[in-house]
Amino acid sequence: MAREKILVTGGAGFIGSHTCVELLDNGFDVYVIDNFSNSKPDVIKRIETIANQSLTFYNIDLRDKPRLKEILSAHTYTAIIHFAGLKAVGESVLQPLLYYQHNLEILMNLLEYKEGHTSFIFSSSATVYDTKKDAPYKESDPLNPINPYGQTKFMAEKILRDVCYISKTQLIILRYFNPIGAHPSGIIGEFPQAHPNNLMPYLLEVVSKNKDRLYIFGDDYQTLDGTGCRDYIHVVDLAKAHVKAVSLRSQLPEYNVFNLGTGQSTSVLELVTMFKQVNKVDIPYEMATRRQGDAANVFADITSASQSLDWVTKYNISDMCRDAYKWMKLSRKNV
């Protein structure tokens, strides 16, 4: 029986690369589109090394419509998994037009040429939720993104729902909470190309002595230790959810939205303390004032994903810290 073909945009990125490994491990043929704007060329070989299988790679920008049309016409893909896009919240605030133009243009280019491909799986984000509501967040909760990055995800979801409905394409929207960690092998992980905005990449910069200290923004939230709380999920658990979505798509309706998190919240200080304990390193940090728009406590209700996708998370915060540090040590030697 022929293996099913899956097209993965942004497949060399942090979440995309881990998902490609899981897809290959589960018997799918993987076709990757990436232009390495937020990754490195050797990631493709690293994916193949872990999976001990090859994939098909296209080095193109999704704004190259003739080339994109050619790739989408070459095969009938069982599903398109769309990871590609700009993703730094802070950068989106400073350059909103860049984010609206880029993230929505590449999505619409994909949709223009997706005819005949049966399922579309979209990489969305918890940033679409209205953080004025108390956590946990359910898929049916109000949406009100507070930054341009979140707005592009919100707009993309609306565009996808309209287009996929009229074209009878199955749509699966996956709203991520806070992916961290790395593959347990240490072979792939996160390659932040610019100034890191998220906690774990910044923390790793401090541990590797590229930054002198970690700044923790806000110590006066209504949480156990005053620092902000988030739902951190291991990137491999996140990747496995995508494989579940592809594998079980025939049992799902035409329109689906799933939160992907652990359903638990961890404070910034708890994460820093765990990282220090697990990896036996020091992390100098300094408290700073809150950042505008940051919420006190954000975590997911994952009931829907657990039931519909038969999906449970395997890794805990200790695992996330261990694997991120292993990746950092090996990547500093080999990259």
Image: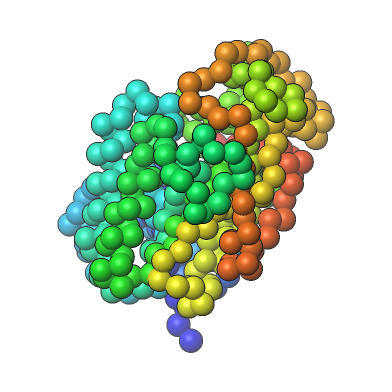
Furthest residue toward left: 66
Residue 202, percent from left and from top = 58, 26
- The quarter in which the C terminus is drawn is top right
Q: Is residue 212 above or below residue 279?
A: above
| Residue 94 seen from this side | yes
Q: Is residue 296 left or right of residue 106?
A: right
Residue 49, percent from left and from top = 58, 56
Quarter of the image holding residue 120? bottom left
| Residue in the image at 33% along x and 50% along y | 156
Q: Is residue 175 left or right of residue 73?
A: right
How many marks do you count on the picture?
0
Quarter of the image holding residue 146? top left
Q: Is residue 170 above or below residue 186?
A: below
Q: Is residue 296 left or right of residue 36?
A: right
Say which of 131 and 6 sits in front. 131
| Residue in the image at 36% along x and 33% along y | 148
| Residue in the image at 29% along x and 54% along y | 159
| Residue in the image at 52% along x and 66% along y | 245
Q: How is the image coloured?
A: rainbow
Say which of 131 and 267 sits in front. 131
Residue 296, percent from left and from top = 61, 29
Q: Is residue 209 above or below residue 178?
A: above
Furthest residue toward bottom: 1
Residue 52, percent from left and from top = 58, 63
| Residue 77 seen from this side | no
Q: Is residue 313 above or below residue 202?
A: below
